[in-house]
Image (cartoon, helix red, strand yellow):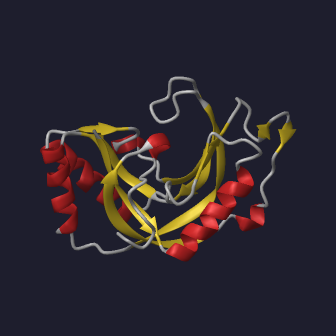
Amino acid sequence: MPYGVVLLPDRETHDRLVALAAATGGPDPVHVLGERAPAHVSVVHFDGDATQATQVASRLSGHPMRALSAKIIGLLFAVVPHGDYYVPQGGVYFGLEVVRRPDLDTLHREVLGWVRDAGATPLGAVGDDFRPHVTLGVRRGGTPGVAADRPVVPDLSAVPVGEIRLTPAFGELGPYGTFPGLRPGNA
């Protein structure tokens, strides 16, 4: 079963990101943020059994870090090939890029160590390939910025460039890299 350690924004930031996702997703998105797909910055996703998950969750609950500041630097569109772990049908990813700062990188490597200590298997980009981001959603098609034969250009003034405050949480991984059981502010 897949799980993850993530960082959740407060409710107000989450709601702004959900609105941005809806506006950017185009007329027929594959997936966008919402109540069952809360905004988050992933620290580590992993595949493991319930015992391994409990070990990682326990270490997170005992961790002294209660919040972390992250800096959003822009909006990215990227083609996701057919067969991707998170988006098997492929499409166009759109999300907010987050600066890979030392405190976030240290947390990532620490949690990655917990996952490996538990005997679980990390998923996605980890270690040197770690790329912190907030997935807003996935569009249908193969051309970034184009959906249903017409460009969908978001209002770039709605992109929350700058600092956001995040709190750590542990959850079960759902479709499209989401955490349906988590809610903003309930970390």
Q: 69 or 168, which lies in front?
A: 168
The N terminus: image quadrant: top left
In which quadrant of the rendered view does residue 12 lie?
Answer: bottom right
**Position in image of residue 142 (x %, y %):** 70, 29
Image location (x, y in percent) of residue 46: 29, 42
Looking at the rendered image, the quarter that the C terminus falls into is bottom left
Q: Nearer the viewer, residue 180 or 134?
A: 180
Residue occupying image coordinates x 14% and y 39%? 119
Q: Seen from this angle, which residue lies furthest right?
A: 150
Question: Vertical placement of 132 versus 77: above or below?
Answer: below
* Quarter location, residue 125: top left
Position of residue 19 relative to residue 49, above or below, is below
- Is residue 161 in view from this perspective? no
Q: Number of marks in the image?
A: 0
Q: Nearer the viewer, residue 25 or 62?
A: 25
Percent x, y of residue 56:
19, 54
Q: Is residue 185 left or right of residue 145?
A: left
Position in image of residue 104 (x %, y %)? 38, 61
Quarter-of-image position of residue 157: bottom right
Taking the image as drawn, is residue 176 in sight? yes
Residue under the image location 77 percent in, 45 percent down: 27
Above or below, 30 relative to 12: above
- Please state if 147 lies on the left or on the right of 41 as rendered: right
